[in-house]
Amino acid sequence: MRDGDIRSELDAFLRQQHADDPNTLIRHEMGLCGGKRRIDVALLNGEISGFEIKSDEDTLFRLFGQADAYRRVLDRVTLVTTSRHKEKAISLLPSWWGVKVARQSQGCVTLDTEREPGINTELDSFALAQLLWRGEALEELKNRGLSKGLSKKARHYVWLALAQSVTIEELRVLVRERVKARPEWLVAPRYARSGAMHPTVATE
C-alpha cells in the first residue's frame, strides 16, 4: 500500500468524522518546529492532533526523530501504518501514541484502530510558539504590551519572548485559534482520490 492510498482514506475518514464541526481544520503537511519537521496530517479543533503515515513503501528510520518533535507540539498523535510495520512501530512508540492499521481488500482501503491515542503531557512552549507566523506571534506580544525591542528581531526571538510570556495552557489556546483563523487556511486542502493534492498556500 502506498502513502497516497492511506492518505486519501485518512482524509476522507477525518472529514466525515468532523463534517458537522465548523471549528475543525484539517491540514496536510503542516510544518512543525520552525519547519524542521512536518506532520502528514494535522487536525485542529479543541486540540492539535497529528497523524503520521508509514506505508509499505516507507521505513521507520525517521520515526524516532519525528516522535521527539511531535511530542513537543501535538496534543495527540496517531501512527497510520500497515501490518508490515505495525509490531515494530508499536515497540518504538511512546505509549500515548495511537495506532491505526490500513488494510486493503478488493481495491478498498480501511483503517482499523489498534490503539487509541492518549494525551501528551510533554508539550514545549517554544515549539508551540513556532506554529505561529512571526507576525502572529509579534501581534500577540503587542496585545500584551510585551513587544518592545522585538519589531525588527528575527522570528526566533519573537517566538522565545511569547513562549516565556504566557502559560503553556494559554499558549495552547491562542496558537490553535490563530492557526485556525488564517484566511489562507480557512479552506483546508483536500487530498484527492487520485493521490494528488489540490494547490494550496505553503505552510511556512
Image: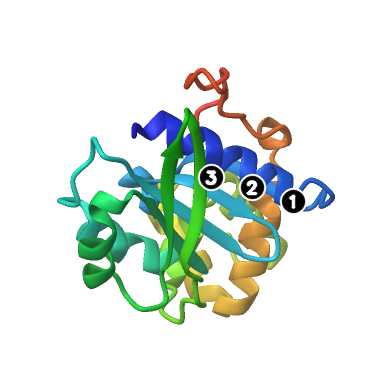
Q: Tag on residue 133?
A: 3
Q: CA distance from mark 2 to mark 1?
A: 6 Å
- Relative to 86, say whether 25 is above or below: above
Who's the residue at 64% across and 74% down the image? 170
Specify the quadrant of the image occupied by residue 177: bottom right
Proximity of marks 3 and 2: CB atoms separated by less than 8 Å: no
Who's the residue at 52% across and 69% down the image? 75
CA neighbours of label 2 inside 10 A, class few (<14), some (14 to 19), many (20+): some
Q: Position of residue 129 (x, y in %)?
A: 50, 60
Q: Tag on residue 14?
A: 2
Horizontally, residue 155 falls left or right of residue 93, namely right
Can residue 149 be seen here?
A: no
Q: Of the residues under marks 3 and 1, which one precedes in the sequence?
A: 1
Q: Nearer the viewer, residue 158 or 99?
A: 99
Name the residue that disc number 1 marks: 18
CA neighbours of label 3 inside 10 A, class few (<14), some (14 to 19), many (20+): some
Specify the quadrant of the image occupied by residue 201: top right
Q: Position of residue 107 (x, y in %)?
A: 47, 28
Q: Secondary structure at mark 1?
A: loop
Looking at numbered disc 2 in the image, what kind of residue is underneath it? Answer: Leu
Q: CA distance from mark 3 to mark 2?
A: 26 Å
Q: Position of residue 112 (x, y in %)?
A: 50, 56
Proximity of marks 2 and 1: CB atoms separated by less than 8 Å: yes
Q: Of the residues under marks 3 and 2, which one precedes in the sequence?
A: 2
Q: Tag on residue 50?
A: none
Extreme residue toward the left, this view: 61
Looking at numbered disc 3 in the image, what kind of residue is underneath it? Answer: Trp
Q: Nearer the viewer, residue 147 or 91?
A: 91
Q: Nearer the viewer, residue 73 or 129?
A: 73
